Image: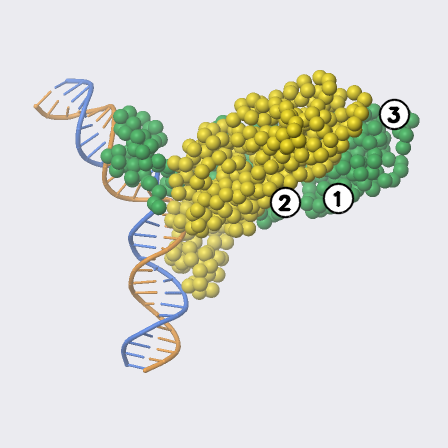
Chain colours: A yellow, B green, C orange, D blue
Amino acid sequence: MRRTTIRDVAALAGVSPATVSRALDDRPEIRPETRERVREACRQLGYVPNAAAKGLAGQATHVLGVVVPDVSNPYFAGIANAIEETAAENGYRVLLSNSLQEEERELQAIENFVARRIDGVVISALSRETQARHAPLLEGMPCVYLGVNHGEGCSYVAADNERGAWLAARHLLDLGHRDLVFLGGHADSLTRVQRAAGFRRALEEQGLTGRVLPAPTDARDMRQWAYDQALELFRRRPLPHAIAAFSDMTALKILEAAEEAGVRVPEDVSLVGYDNIEYAALPRIHLTTVSQHKLRQGRLAVERVLRQIRGDREAAAELIEPELIVRSTCIPRTEGGTSL
Amino acid sequence: MRRTTIRDVAALAGVSPATVSRALDDRPEIRPETRERVREACRQLGYVPNAAAKGLAGQATHVLGVVVPDVSNPYFAGIANAIEETAAENGYRVLLSNSLQEEERELQAIENFVARRIDGVVISALSRETQARHAPLLEGMPCVYLGVNHGEGCSYVAADNERGAWLAARHLLDLGHRDLVFLGGHADSLTRVQRAAGFRRALEEQGLTGRVLPAPTDARDMRQWAYDQALELFRRRPLPHAIAAFSDMTALKILEAAEEAGVRVPEDVSLVGYDNIEYAALPRIHLTTVSQHKLRQGRLAVERVLRQIRGDREAAAELIEPELIVRSTCIPRTEGGTSL
DNA sequence: CCTTTTTCTGCAAACGTTTCCGGCTCCTAT
DNA sequence: ATAGGAGCCGGAAACGTTTGCAGAAAAAGG
């Protein structure tokens, strides 16, 4: 079943393939009536230009690539949406790939992108190591990194993790809480290290030292780990005054553990998340959290790649100011403590 | 900055482009040492084959297309993931497109797919009308529809909406509720009509007639509409015994309205959703709902397209049995009613 | 040692566009 | 009348692969 080609259209319209190409591109050197004839022929034959051939002959593909760890994670879904929207506004399509937290897949995704001769790419890299391995592949391709800053010489847009965690901890402190714990620090993820640092700094400024519980290295175990840790915390007495979670997803796990252990949030312990994913705004959840302005990040990232595509090849960095979103999981500490 | 081509590799390895092509394809007719030489040359030059050229010359692209209304909707995100996974297992990549509830975008997405000469496509169509408009474009392309059955002669896999809604209503009835309302029926979406029908049938079997509140035609207003309707319901007395929502997203809006109006779920009114999205399983939410087995649907859909690609071109239909997922938003009706 | 296979590799023709370079027609100004 | 321009359009060469076919070299068989 051969697909109809530009030649078939040309034959039917009684012109040359070159003319068809120009007519469909709305170029001025084609007489209106010829253009109309070509259009009609296309319609009759149901002609759809072959993108591969176009890509071979032309130069710009007008496609952007995006690789994120996992679109089914609402945080990345949000970013991906913002990227897609901004791209569309500028006449670009976007191809999306998940790395699923695996280095191999991340590399494959990028390789697939350069194979398609995509115009530019925005990457939410897994780690500093994998980012280093991108470089040879990316060779001359416009590219901006998203979310965390671990590369020198590359453009990136990220939110200030240290500052965000500081805001969260500060909020807890202001509410009178003193015994704070941060769930999900360290490991070799830069993001975690930065947030843990912000948390610590806030406490130190008050002469306090909080507890930072380090998460396992493998990010995939994170959620179960958070649940287990929280459960343990909740079964001991005295309870901590408040918990700052590495992410909203972590916070949700903590909430789950709280239900299991019969401790009430926020009456018995306050809780603050990070990311401001959609889940956090759900009824009955109302999670106080920190927004990274993912929409703005996505938009900015696209604008940066586009600028690179247009020729402005110098690495630029943008650090976005996070914002505390106050909902209902943090309340002031009552001096006498609770009934527990 | 010319990208390195197969000719460059051939020159460096001292062979012809044809040999390079064959070597990289691991074809048996190439001597191992030649293959190794070619590989080495590729590595040195950082050669990545041009997908466009490949697509032009070869025939199968090993790419599947998926179009869904909105991946940021957790229901579709789940399906998309299942599809991607199954495709990967079979050596296929997938391209994802959102129609964003707009007919034009849906058509564009499909056109883009056929432009790319994709091997097959799975579509969650917006309506019967748009589906009719796909046909000329799809001409000979393996294709299966997902979620709802409104085409004759096309393959599809869907869950039995009528049965699912029946299950939900039946559950409510079994718990002793008598005054039931279904939120989000009718409109010209087949899915809605089917679910409303299932709801009605369950009631009629008990000699009851429930209330079915018809949603607005434009699906985008759905959420706000659900909130408004629920609020009105909750402000009147007596309260209905229970509410069956068109979807989990709708149910969430109802939950929100309940909070606003100060009515407790499930103590004052029971609530059942539909879809079993991730949100439903969240702590504090625990929404009783109906699962459509979206993972299974996604998997099945891919298997069907693959079969079509391999030559088995007859339309096949698969109707999946939905399943009631009991959580905590429905409780038995206490005879005396509540304190309200 | 000469044929016949077998094994490996190269040539060149696709694949479906875009675009450069010209060429033809028809006007307009000289 | 003729030269010089516009305005339109066609020819053909790319773009980077794959693949059918044929040919050369090596191995096998006589």
Residue at 66% of width from left, 38% of height from top?
A324
Residue named by callout 1: B225
Q: A6 or C20: nearer the eye? A: C20
Left or right placement of residue B268 versus residue C20 in this view: right
Kind of residue sitting beneath label 1: Trp
For the image, the number of numbered tags is 3
Residue named by callout 3: B334
* Callouts 3 and 2 in the same chain: yes
Which residue is the extreme one toward the right?
Answer: B336
Residue B106 in the image: x percent, y percent?
A: 58, 45
The image shows residue D21, relative to residue A89, as above or below, that is: above
Q: B295 or A269: nearer the eye? A: A269
Mark 2 surroundings within 10 Å by alpha-carbon count, few (fewer than 14), some (14 through 19), many (20 or more): some
Q: CA distance from mark 2 to mark 1?
A: 17 Å
Q: CA distance from mark 3 to mark 1?
A: 30 Å
Query: Looking at the image, is mark 2 or mark 1 nearer the viewer?
Result: 1
Kind of residue sitting beneath label 3: Thr
Q: Specify the subunit that label 2 lies on.
A: B
The image shows residue B135, relative to residue A171, as above or below, that is: below
Residue B285 in the image: x percent, y percent?
A: 73, 29
| 3 or 2: tag closer to the N-terminus | 2
Whether the residues at callouts 3 and 2 have beta carbons within 8 Å, the answer is no
Whether the residues at callouts 3 and 1 have beta carbons within 8 Å, the answer is no
* Callouts 2 and 1 in the same chain: yes
Residue at 58% of width from left, 23% of height from top?
A214
Residue named by callout 2: B101
| 2 or 1: tag closer to the N-terminus | 2
| 3 or 1: tag closer to the N-terminus | 1
Left or right placement of residue B7 versus residue B268 in this view: left
Residue at 37% of width from left, 37% of height from top?
B49
